[in-house]
Amino acid sequence: MESMYPGYNVLDLQDEWDPHTREIVNRRLGPFTFKLLSPWEQAMIKAVAEHLICDGREEILEWVAFHVDEQLAKPFGEAQRKPGVPPQKELVRRGLKTLDLWAKKHFSEAFLKLDASRQLQLISSFQQGSFHKDTGWETDVQKEFFKKVLGLVTEAYYSHPWVWSEIGYGGPAYPRGYVRIELGITDPWEPRRVGTNEGS
Amino acid sequence: MKDRKFGKEEVDVAVVGLGAAGSVLLCDLAEAGLRVVGIEAGPFWDPQNDFASDELHAKTLAWNDTRLSTGQDPLQLGSNNSGRGVGGGTVHFTGVFYRFHPSDFKVRTLDGVAEDWPISYADLEPFYAKIEQDIKVSGPREFPWGAFHGPYPYPEREPISGNAQVFRKGCEALGIKSTVAPLAILSAPYAGRPPCTNRGFCNQGCMPNAKFSTLIHHIPRALKAGAEVLSDCMATRILVNKGGLVTGVEFNHNGRNYQQKAKIVVLSAFVIETPRLLLNSACSQFPDGLANSSGLVGKYIMPHSGHDVYARFEEEIRLYKGTPVLAVSQDFYETDQSRGFVRGYSLNAHGSRPVGLARLAALNAGIWGKQLRELMLEWNHYARITLVGEVLPALSNCVTLSDEKDEYGLPRAQVSFSYGENDRKLIAHGIEKCKEILTAAGGQPALVIPDSAHLMGGCRMGNDPQTSVVNRFCQSHDIPNLYICDASVFVTSGGANPTETVMAIASRTAGHIASLA
């Protein structure tokens, strides 16, 4: 699981970006001021996120947790929600508590103290909604908690410029667009796979 | 609200919602000399300062107010199918600009399902042609499907992206016709706007203004012709007098309520908010909501099935480069009884960006953790085709009012949706075709992500007041000075991106209203 584009860094290109985009992307590098989530909740989000995105880099997890905080703290809507499912702020905060209660019940240990495989086991059972008798939460609500966190974490992770570089994504493109868009050719500033000489 | 132009007077027409339909109405009516006000819930965007080359940021362009979404196949709303702000969904649409086919307007007659529209392709044809010319649609010299075969006003886009090349190669190998996409995106300069720079951020708001939106085309024209635009103004109620006619619109701006008097009100607030506003405007004269004597306000809503099929290729495809949709096929658009279902679909070679791909893979295909990380590290090797599949109307697919209230104290919309049997068969067929095309191009089908796109229906048009909400000119059957004009009047969904048809209907309705004045 290694990047095919080592050495490529979209941030090196930021002088080519419009100021608004540059500001938005650089904010993802921190520092972050949380508005809603407690330090424990932040730690829980990071612990869960690490499994969802399969990446444990603290700087990135910090951004991911901050994005979750920002989305839950904002006053406006969440586009859609299933009937009977609590609003996202309540859903996520209660979900984190439930996850911890569960960890204590099944493994006699706080979630944050569990080893990775046990954490993953609990997260997966949330995805299945399989613990409803223990939690007082309907199967559907558990699944919705999992999906809500998964959506927020995934969109944050794939918005981090380090991740863009690793997957070989050219990143922001304004005012400069692309000239060579056809198969096998690339603009000079795009990521190139190691060992290939495409586009030259 | 300071500096109101028409604040104290009764205007000729108030339009609620300034998206694909409302902006066309506002422009056409203002240019016809009518005094018009457009009332838009969201901001008046400035592309240079409000948009960004960023997927996460672009979520602000969508209608994010919470709706309750239910049914066997609950719809994803927000940025999936709605806009907020002047320009509405045209600000972040892909720019694919299809006409409907003649068969789309007579599905009952031809296929024995759904209903016929009260208008025909011929009724819309002049408006399709006018709009294409007006915004300089680029497209192929010859378009092989439907009734219009080109040429388009502006030449087709070239070059096409790697993803579009792969699509065309696969189609060619199988004897499936494909073309470069007809697009509301410039292929040459026009009106001070540049041709597309292939940055690929159509869904995030076009910053160079190469892509058409009503924000940059119709709204400036409307303003020049004397229209007033009220942005950040959420319409909360349509006002009705004792005689059962509408008298104007109540709206909320920064927490305060205002009223705009109007001789005619046009609702162009899209498939969920238009029915919601009609239902929330219930009064003693119309206890079941406005224009609802048929009981069909909010009923028969339809998305398009929008499944994404991905295949892995040895070479890099780089889905992020270029206009997202640059090649298409409508070879499977018309009914073919041998397939075991009626109606059909379009196939769009469809680029993607990391958040869009990863988020849908996670939420709709259950791919996360190591599997998602591995997929994304190789995402440059994937090509994608997206289905735009016709969904047949069903009474049970509907918008109703829930028990939950929003920040204005109004009941939130509840949206219920389930695919029918024909829809599922059509989807299965479309997915197989996508896999065949990608395989024929040398790819290895890898991933199918269920998705939907667009919304239509909810206030359908028809000749019979008992089975429809508006007539063939989008005038409500029940209230002669209330019009409903947006995708909610669609009787069937067609199997093509709907924006051009929405705009053609709007332009036709504007002509009708102007002729009454």
Image (cartoon, rainbow, N blue to C red):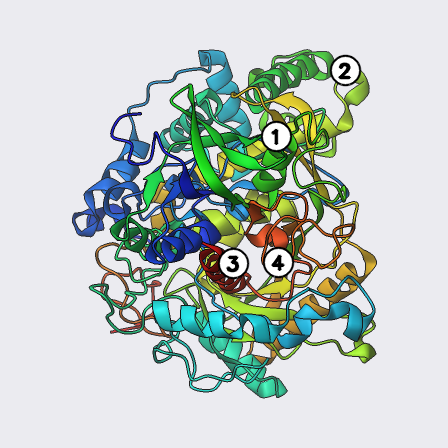
Looking at the rendered structure, which numbered label has been put on residue B509? 3
Query: Which residue is at the front of the view, B246 or B52?
Result: B246
Q: CA distance from mark 1 to mark 4?
A: 33 Å
Disc 3: CA contacts within 10 A as few (<14), some (14-19) or many (>=20): many
Q: Secondary structure at mark 1?
A: loop
Image side of residue B282 versus residue A131, left or right: left
Q: Residue at x 74, y 34 (%)?
A: A128
Q: Between tags 2 and 1, which lies in front?
A: 1
Percent x, y of residue A61: 42, 30
Left/right placement of residue B218 relative to residue B340 reads left
**What type is the residue that disc 3 sits on?**
Thr
Is the residue at mark 1 from the same chain as the one at mark 4? Answer: yes
Count the marks: 4
User: Callout 3: residue from which chain?
Assistant: B
Q: Is residue A159 visible?
A: no
Q: Which residue does the numbered mark 2 point to in the structure image?
A: A136
| Secondary structure of residue under mark 4 | loop
Using the rendered image of the protein, determine whether residue B401 is visible from the camera's viewpoint: yes
Separation (CA) of disc 3 from disc 2:
54 Å
Q: Which mark is residue B306?
A: 4
